[in-house]
Image (spheres, grey):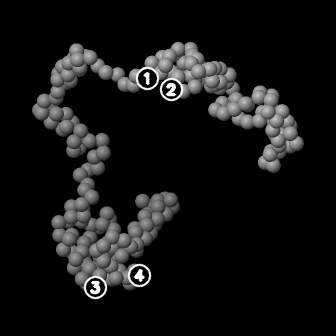
């Protein structure tokens, strides 16, 4: 099956991928002839310098400052001139900018006063002085307490029985409060056990799920 292109008059044949409906509507041999290379709508034009055929897209037609169109940057340079990129201030303008910036310099005293307005309790993210440092959160002697727990349990996880280490990963050694610290703040030896990182995460997840269930049932 063959047809003749409406635009260039070239004969073209049906492709195996073309459906019957598409073949009946097909009138052009290629995308360039149909004018749908970039957009379905547009118009044909000629380069103002060399005379090559162009397909002008509507938004480019509106944005043209000269009202003329070119096939390449080289043709545009011949008629319009080289494209200027960026903007360069004169020396007088630069000096004015320097003087304006010099007036805006903040003194150390005003900078300190401004910093105090947004520091500590005045900061929007203030949480009552709670620190992420374990030594501050669990007490000053927390480091020595957890080492005693590790030695007592022989550096073995009390849930899965794996040998723990100080390196990153699932086997990372952790000290766990049976009764959570947030409830009783109890660092007693009976309340502490050795866990690996994986088991510690699971235990914390079980506790959080338990609290959620109690809240749903109307407790607390």
On screen, 200 above or below 80?
A: below
Q: Name the residue under label 2.
A: 73
Q: In which quarter of the image is the N terminus?
A: top right
- Contact? badges 1 and 4 (CB < 8 Å): no
What element does badge 1 sit on?
loop
What percent of the width, then of the height, locates residue 124? 30, 41
> x and y percent of residue 84 in the render?
40, 22
Q: How crowded is mark 1: few (under 14 residues within 10 Å), some or many (20 or more)?
A: few
Disc 1 + disc 2, Cβ < 8 Å: yes
**How far apart, in angstroms, are the residues tagged by discs 1 and 2?**
9 Å
Front residue of 207/197: it is: 197
* Residue at (22% x, 15% y) in the render: 92
Distance from label 4 to label 2 (Cα)? 71 Å
Q: Which mark is residue 160?
A: 4
- Labels 3 and 1 touching (C-beta < 8 A): no
The residue under the point 54% across, 27% down is 72
What residue do we see at 50% from left, 26% from top? 73
Counting residues from the N terminus, which is met first, the one under dot 1 or under dot 2? 2
In this view, the residue farthest toward the right is: 1
Q: Name the residue under label 3.
A: 154
- Of mark 3 and mark 4, the one earlier in the sequence is 3
Disc 3 + disc 4, Cβ < 8 Å: no
């Amino acid at each position: 099956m063959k047809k003749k292109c409406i635009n260039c008059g070239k004969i073209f044949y049906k492709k195996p991928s073309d459906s019957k409906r598409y073949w009946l509507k097909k009138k052009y041999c290629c995308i360039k002839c149909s004018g749908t290379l970039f957009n379905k709508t547009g118009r044909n034009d000629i380069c103002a310098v060399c005379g090559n055929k162009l397909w002008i897209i509507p938004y480019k037609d509106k944005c043209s400052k000269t009202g003329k169109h070119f096939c390449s940057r080289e043709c545009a340079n011949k008629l319009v001139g080289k494209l200027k990129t960026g903007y360069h201030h004169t020396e007088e303008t630069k000096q004015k900018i320097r003087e304006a910036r010099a007036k805006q310099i903040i003194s150390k005293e005003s900078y300190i006063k401004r910093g105090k307005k947004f520091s500590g309790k005045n900061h929007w993210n203030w949480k009552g002085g709670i620190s992420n440092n374990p030594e501050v959160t669990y007490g000053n002697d927390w480091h020595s307490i957890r080492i005693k727990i590790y030695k007592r349990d022989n550096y073995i996880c009390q849930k899965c029985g794996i040998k723990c280490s100080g390196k990153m990963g699932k086997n990372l050694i952790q000290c766990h409060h049976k009764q959570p610290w947030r409830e009783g703040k109890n660092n007693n030896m009976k309340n502490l056990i050795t866990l690996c990182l994986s088991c510690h995460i699971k235990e914390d997840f079980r506790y959080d799920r338990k609290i959620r269930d109690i809240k749903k049932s109307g407790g607390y």
